[in-house]
Image (spheres, rainbow, N blue to C red):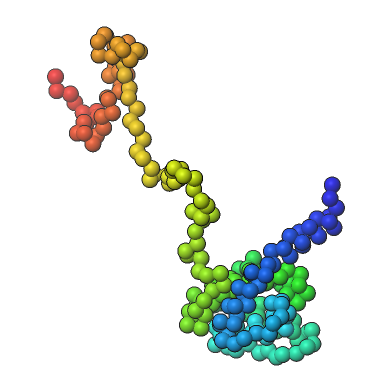
Amino acid sequence: MASVSSLDQDLKNLRLKKYTPQASEMVRSWIISTLGESLPDKDLMDLLKDGTLLCRLANLLSDRQLKFKASAMPFVQMENISHFLSFISSPPVSLPPHDRFLTVDLFDRKDPAQVVQCLSAFSRAAHALNPQKFPETIGGLKGGVLSPAALSPQPSGAKSPVSPGRGEPKKKEVVTAWTKKDQEFTTTPAWNIMQYGYMGGASQNQGISFGARRQI
C-alpha cells in the first residue's frame, strides 16, 4: 500500500506533467497579442512571477486600475499576484474557484498547470466582456470544438452513429394469429386476436373512437 507522502508526490507529479511547452506557448502568444508587445525569452512562470503582467492584463478590463509596481522583493511580487486574484474572483469577471490558482501555485511553481487553466478561463471571460481589447482567447473559443469521436477516423464502410430519435424508424412488428407461417390465411387461426383487444395497430388517428356506442 502506497504511503500518503508518496501519493501526494504522485499527484504533484501528475499536475506538473500537465504544464506542457505547448500550453505555455499558447498563453505566451496570447499575452503578446493582447498587450501588443514582445516578451523576454524566459519561461512563462518566470515572466508572470512578479505579477506585473497579470495586473496589466486586468487593467485592460477594469475601470478602476489595479495598483502594482515592479520589484524584486518577494512580498511585493506576491502582493501583485494577490491583486490580480482578487480582481478575477470579483464581478464582472467572477471566475469560479476551480478556475483560479493560489499565489504559491505561481510564485513557488506549486501548480503551473492551474495557472495556465486560470489564464485560459480569464481570456474567455475577458473576451466576452470586452472583445475589442481581448479579440482572442487562449486555445480559441469553445463553441466550435469537435468531439473526439468526430475527429477519429472511421473504418471504410462503417456507419456513423445515429443519435436517439434521429435514426431509421423501427420496423412495425407483424402480429399474426397463426402458429405456423405456411398455414397463414389458409386454416382457422389458433386464436382470435380481436378477442384479446388487438386492433391491428389501429389508433385514434385513423378515426376510430374507443369506448363509443356501437351501432348494431
**Image: 213 above or below 138:** above
Residue beneath the point at 68% across and 85% down: 40
Q: Is residue 125 visible?
A: no
Q: Position of residue 86 (x, y in %)?
A: 65, 78
Q: How many marks?
A: 0
- Residue for point 84% across, 50% down: 2
- Left or right of 41 on screen, residue 6: right
Percent x, y of residue 71: 75, 90
Q: Is residue 198 above or below residue 161?
A: above
In which quadrant of the rendered view does residue 199 lie? top left
78 or 25: which is nearer to us?
25
Please indicate whether residue 61 sits to the left or right of residue 101 in the image: left
**Residue 206 seen in the figure:** yes
Residue at the far left in the pictured view? 216
Picture coordinates of residue 14, whole percent (x, y): 73, 60
Q: Looking at the picture, tell me which residue is in the foreground, 77 or 197.
A: 77
Residue shown at the point (78%, 88%) measured from the top left: 72
Residue 179 in the image: above or below residue 159:
above
